[in-house]
Image (cartoon, rainbow, N blue to C red):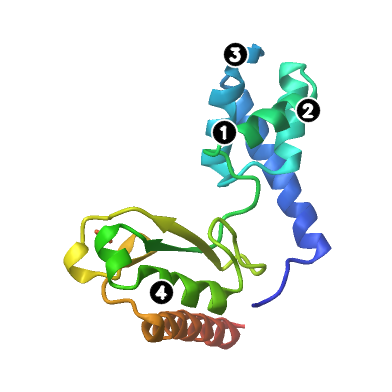
Amino acid sequence: MGTIPDEKDTTSEEAQNREKTIKVLQGFSRKRFNLIPILQKVQGSLGYLPHEAMIEIAEYLDIPAIDVYGVTTFYNQFRLTPPGKHSIRVCLGTACHMKGGYITLDAWKRRLQIEPGETTADREFDLDTVACVGCCTMAPVTVVDDKPEGSVEPTRVDGILLAFEQERAGKKEVESESD
Ligand code: FES
């Protein structure tokens, strides 16, 4: 789906990530015990922990980069890949499971061509699973950008994606008109 950012975009993104990381670091003393709070704050700022941020953090704390990397892979609160623009979370709580939540999940996996915990290559969508979100009467539920959508059967998966595609097409049209 879509395109992968080109090299120039990636470089400027890296520079921005470094800058934001340095800004976060300024709020902490150079003590190793600050590693986890720093990682949490950097992730809060960038949405994830890119390689360049981990290098900055390691240099700041004067510890090997591999130690920083080790902590980020040990705790699953940390994500190492950029988040998608939209989050898709399929409920697999009991009620949703009974109403075919796994079939809905399969439909999302097929349509987005990713597994739960992954992001599409164009960074449009994250796919994940979630336990009961408290809307069991609407099962099977998929939470789309924090909004629980009810009765999400495989056919509705296509409808939700179509709405996003139309929104994107509409935005592109407005952009080309303003050029
Ligand atoms: S089990 Fe899915 S909302 Fe409760």
Question: Do tag 4 and tag 2 residues touch (Cβ < 8 Å)?
Answer: no
Circle 4 residue: 104
Secondary element at image label 2: helix
Residue type of the residue flagged with mark 4: Thr
**Of the residues under marks 1 and 2, which one precedes in the sequence?**
2
Alpha carbon separation for disc pair 3 and 2: 15 Å
* Residue toward you, 20 or 154: 154
The residue positioned 27% from the left and 76% from the top of the image is 151
Which residue reaches farthest left? 137
Residue type of the residue flagged with mark 1: Tyr
Which residue reaches farthest right? 7
Q: Position of residue 61 (x, y in %)?
A: 71, 18
Alpha carbon separation for disc pair 1 and 2: 16 Å
Circle 2 residue: 65
Q: Nearer the viewer, mark 1 or mark 2?
A: 1
Q: Is residue 105 left or right of residue 75?
A: left
Residue 6, picture quadrant: bottom right
| Residue 158 sits above or below residue 38 on the image | below
Q: Is residue 118 left or right of residue 103?
A: right
Where is ligand 1, by quadrant? bottom left
- Which numbered circle lies on residue 33? 3
Question: Do tag 3 and tag 1 residues touch (Cβ < 8 Å)?
Answer: no
Residue type of the residue flagged with mark 2: Ala
**Of the residues under marks 3 and 2, which one precedes in the sequence?**
3
Question: Do tag 1 and tag 4 residues touch (Cβ < 8 Å)?
Answer: no
**Of the residues under marks 3 and 1, which one precedes in the sequence?**
3
The residue positioned 17% from the left and 67% from the top of the image is 137
- Which numbered circle lies on residue 75? 1
Secondary element at image label 4: helix
